[in-house]
Image (cartoon, rainbow, N blue to C red):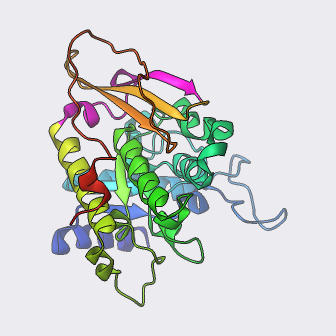
């Protein structure tokens, strides 16, 4: 069975040239007692609840895949605090390239669902993730799981009227692209599809006849261009050296400001996110170096609010 599954993974990479493999529900493999009541499972040979055979299989799979195809990503959807999921097997890890940051996703989406007036009371939902942000090689997952089965589309998770929903969505994307970690955005979210995903239907491409949806699409496109062009946004995603808060505690204004840093010490970006519809004039922040700063992207530009 191990040989068949590993061969299957290699087949997809070799014949269909896929760039990565995601392993679903890894936690259900790692724990013998996962979703089982007392008496429904047997401990391992050491008396623990770890599934030693599954651990061995996952490590072997990652070793083989990365050994033959070094550029291919293996990604774990692992919802617990199992350690070293994305660390090399020779260090005792499972050997995955990336792990989904489920905690970040749940916390930040909860925050965005709150009315802007009440967000000051939930400020920690946007900052808590930094306590563990560099324990794994994380990707920030806005996946199909969040826009199906009655959960609603991503834009409908945003609070407020239609104008505020679009403004919130763009602000959220800006925060996401600035935050440490690789990005995963499910199709349809990039232009603010109203309906939740249905595998029996196509995407709402006709929504792009509206300027507001075009604006979100253009914004995501420009975010990707900035992300690729600015090493500070992607070089040090997994290390504290690539991030520092300017102000993580301005809950009264619901503003977050931080610095992203490249490997070169003088290459950095300042990211400021305002999660209220209130314009903050003369708002002061600190910067790491004196000089003139140039704005490279702003989610409230007219071109992102409606494209005519």
Q: Which quarter of the image is occupied by the N terminus?
A: bottom left
Which residue is drawn at the image coordinates 32% and 13% (left, top)?
288
Q: Could you tell me if residue 250 is visible in this image?
A: yes
Q: Is residue 307 left or right of residue 122?
A: left
**Residue 289, x across and y down, in percent:** 27, 10
- Total numbered badges shown on the rendered structure: 0
Which residue is drawn at the image coordinates 59% and 46% (left, top)?
116
Q: Quadrant of residue 203?
A: bottom left
Up-down: is 8 above or below 178?
Answer: below
**Residue 34, x across and y down, in percent:** 69, 61
Is residue 82 shown in magenta? no
Which residue is drawn at the image coordinates 34% and 69% (left, top)?
187
Q: Is residue 58 left or right of residue 45?
A: left
Which residue is drawn at the image coordinates 46% and 52% (left, top)?
168
> Nearest the camera: 241 or 170?
170
Q: Which residues are magenta?
A: 230-250
> Nearest the camera: 187 or 212?
212
Up-down: is 61 above or below 94?
Answer: below
Q: Could you tell me if residue 219 is visible in this image?
A: no
Q: Quadrant of residue 193?
A: bottom left
> Nearest the camera: 36 or 168?
168
**Residue 285, x across and y down, in percent:** 41, 18
Q: Which quarter of the image is occupied by the C terminus?
A: bottom left
Q: Quadrant of residue 157?
A: bottom right
């Amino acid at each position: 069975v191990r040989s068949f599954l590993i061969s299957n993974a290699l087949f997809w990479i070799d014949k269909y040239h896929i760039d990565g493999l995601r392993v679903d529900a890894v936690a259900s493999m790692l724990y013998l007692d996962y979703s089982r009541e007392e008496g429904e499972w047997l401990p391992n040979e050491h008396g623990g609840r770890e599934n030693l055979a599954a651990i061995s299989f996952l490590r072997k799979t990652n070793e083989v895949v990365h050994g033959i195809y070094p550029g291919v990503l293996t990604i774990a959807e692992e919802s617990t605090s199992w350690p070293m999921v994305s660390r090399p097997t020779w260090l005792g890890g499972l050997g995955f390239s990336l792990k989904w940051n489920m905690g970040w996703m749940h916390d930040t989406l909860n925050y965005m669902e709150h009315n802007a007036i009440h967000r000051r009371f939930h400020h920690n939902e946007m900052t808590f993730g930094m306590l563990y942000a560099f324990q794994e090689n994380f990707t920030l997952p806005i996946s199909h799981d969040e826009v199906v089965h009655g959960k609603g589309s991503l834009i409908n998770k945003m609070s407020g009227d239609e104008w505020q929903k679009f403004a919130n969505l763009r602000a959220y994307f800006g925060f996401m692209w600035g935050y440490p970690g690789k990005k995963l955005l499910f199709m349809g979210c990039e232009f603010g599809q109203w309906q939740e995903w249905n595998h029996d239907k196509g995407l709402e491409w006709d929504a792009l006849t509206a300027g507001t949806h075009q604006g979100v699409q253009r914004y995501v496109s420009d975010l990707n261009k900035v992300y690729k062009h600015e090493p500070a946004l992607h070089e040090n995603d997994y290390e504290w050296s690539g991030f520092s808060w300017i102000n993580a505690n301005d809950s009264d204004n619901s503003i977050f400001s931080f610095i992203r840093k490249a490997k070169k010490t003088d290459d950095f970006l300042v990211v400021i996110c305002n999660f209220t519809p209130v314009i903050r004039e003369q708002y002061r922040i600190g910067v790491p170096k004196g000089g003139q700063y140039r704005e490279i992207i702003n989610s409230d530009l007219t071109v992102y609010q409606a494209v005519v």
